Image (spheres, rainbow, N blue to C red):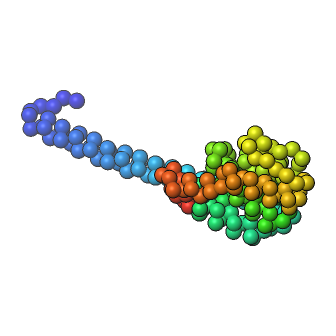
Amino acid sequence: VQTKGAKKSEKQIKGVSGALGSMAKQAGVAAAAYFGTRALVGGIRASIDAFAKQELAEKKLEVALGRTSNMLLKQASALQKSTMFGDEAIIEAQALIGSFVKEEEAIAAATKATLDLAAAKGMDLVVAADLVSKTLGSSTNALSRYGIQVEGAVGSTERLESLTGNLADVFGGQATAQTDTFAGSMAQLSNAFGD
């Protein structure tokens, strides 16, 4: 394109500049819409995943017990508020313990002790629940390497009391105490958002 004269070229340059500015604004609006939509879709996907995980954990507990236990679901919700663990992980731990113990009170006591063990040793809650349930439901003490002694017959009240008492003596209060840290506060915030 040939331009003649200073005024004519100045007018054309302003026109091009204005068009580029308008195009930049439109690109910005399109980018904002794209990333906003992407964030919304990501949030919806995360919500669906969280719901599915919660539902699966509740189903595992129901199958382990042969019924739905509102008492254990309420315990999981209460423990989530006072520890760093999410209620879906707590329910999954309850389900593992419930595979060997059918009494709700016994599962509740073992669950609380399991949270302290997991918090103190920095282990996954389900791994800790697996160790506790194996110790309760078999003659092998899966917790002996952590210094926990257990007495009593497999599945007995004496074995449960020995296990929970010894865990409390060694690791008692760890799960609750860790919420007084920055990491604990962030974990609780994350759990609240998840709900």
Would residue 11 appear left or right of 185 to someone viewing this image?
Answer: left
* Front-lying residue, 82 or 70: 82
* Occupied quadrant, residue 161: bottom right
Q: Residue 30 placed where, x, y %? A: 41, 48
Q: Residue at x 62, y 57 (%)?
A: 173
Q: Position of residue 10 (x, y in %)?
A: 13, 37
Residue 3 showing in the rendered view: yes
Give how far across and how far down residue 132 sits, in percent: 78, 50
User: Which is nearer the eye, 179 or 49?
Assistant: 179
Q: Residue furthest left?
A: 6
Count every numbered label the image shows and give the total: 0
The N terminus lies in quadrant: top left
Quadrant location of the C terminus in the rendered image: bottom right
Residue lying farthest to the top in this orientation? 2
**Left or right, residue 66 beside residue 184:** right
**Residue lying at 84% horizontally and 65% vertically, measured from the top left:** 103
Residue 11 image offset from top left, x and y in percent: 14, 41
Res. 131 visible in picture: no
Choose between 155 and 126: the one closer to the eye.
Answer: 155
Q: Residue at x 50, y 52 (%)?
A: 181
Identify the residue shown where x is 74% and y is 66%: 72
**Is 89 in front, or is 179?**
179
Q: Is 183 drawn above or below residue 65 in the view shown? A: above
Q: Quadrant of the rendered structure where residue 111 is? A: bottom right
Q: Position of 126 compared to 31: left or right?
A: right
Residue 60, quarter of picture: bottom right
